[in-house]
Amino acid sequence: MTEKEKMLSQGLYSSHDTELKKDAMRSRRLTRLYNSTTEDEREYRLQLLKELFGSTGEHISVEPPFRCDYGSNTYIGENFYANFDCIILDVAKVFIGDNCLFGPRVCVFTPAHPIDAEVRNTGIEYGKEIHIGNNVWVGGNTVINPGVTIGNNVVIGSGSVVTKDIPDNVVAVGNPCKVIRPITDKDKKFWTDKLNEYKNS
């Protein structure tokens, strides 16, 4: 297996590999171009994002500045929005569903390093995939750690550090991030009523 194949299989690999360095340079170039765009260059921004990421929906928006390791290992659904200072380190694959919102400074980290210092000092590392479902709102300054799955219809409170899987239809917050309550029909009614008030105002 190549080092890239080892990396994407979530095994140990060396990031000093020539192919991986080339891929990293590609992402640096594309993010540099993206981060230097202006707010009037929407079509160009979308073009760059589609070139950068493994796949995207037709309607996505990422506020500069944005950073990633490779970009090509990140797969994003429809109607994605990321506020300022988003970082996605995608040495393993990152899957983000439809209708997901990221607050400012959300960090998605797939890389991990050996606990043993001598092994870690060799430069060998590994990554674990992250899966984020549909209709997820991630509050600002949240860190999502390697190997985590976040379910559908989830709200992650700001400042959270997500170290374990989060199930569907809950509000979760904290360091470490924990479920604090389910999202219920009462929530749906409250916010539907608020929406109707807005529409009728």
Image (cartoon, rainbow, N blue to C red):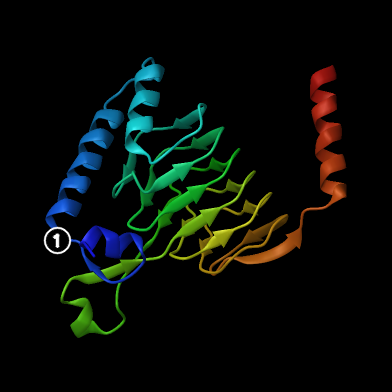
Seen as rendered, the residue at the extreme front is 1
Seen in the picture, residue 159 relative to 37 is either above or below; the reply is below
Q: Quadrant of residue 188?
A: top right
Q: Position of residue 139 (x, y in %)?
A: 56, 49
Which of the image's four quarters has the N terminus? Answer: bottom left
Seen as rendered, the residue at the extreme left is 18
Tell which of 122 and 172 is nearer to you: 122
Q: Is residue 201 left or right of residue 118?
A: right
Looking at the picture, which amino acid does disc 1 mark?
A: His
Residue 66 appears in the rendering: yes
Q: Position of residue 177 (x, y in %)?
A: 58, 65
Seen in the picture, residue 176 relative to 139 is either above or below; the reply is below
In the picture of the structure, the residue carrying the numbered disc 1 is 16
Seen in the picture, residue 14 relative to 152 is either above or below; the reply is below
- Residue found at x 37% / y 58%: 92
Tell which of 85 and 53 is nearer to you: 53
Seen in the picture, residue 32 relative to 176 is either above or below; the reply is above
Circle 1 sits in a helix, a strand or a loop, which is it?
A: loop
Q: Quadrant of residue 194?
A: top right
Q: Quadrant of residue 50?
A: top left
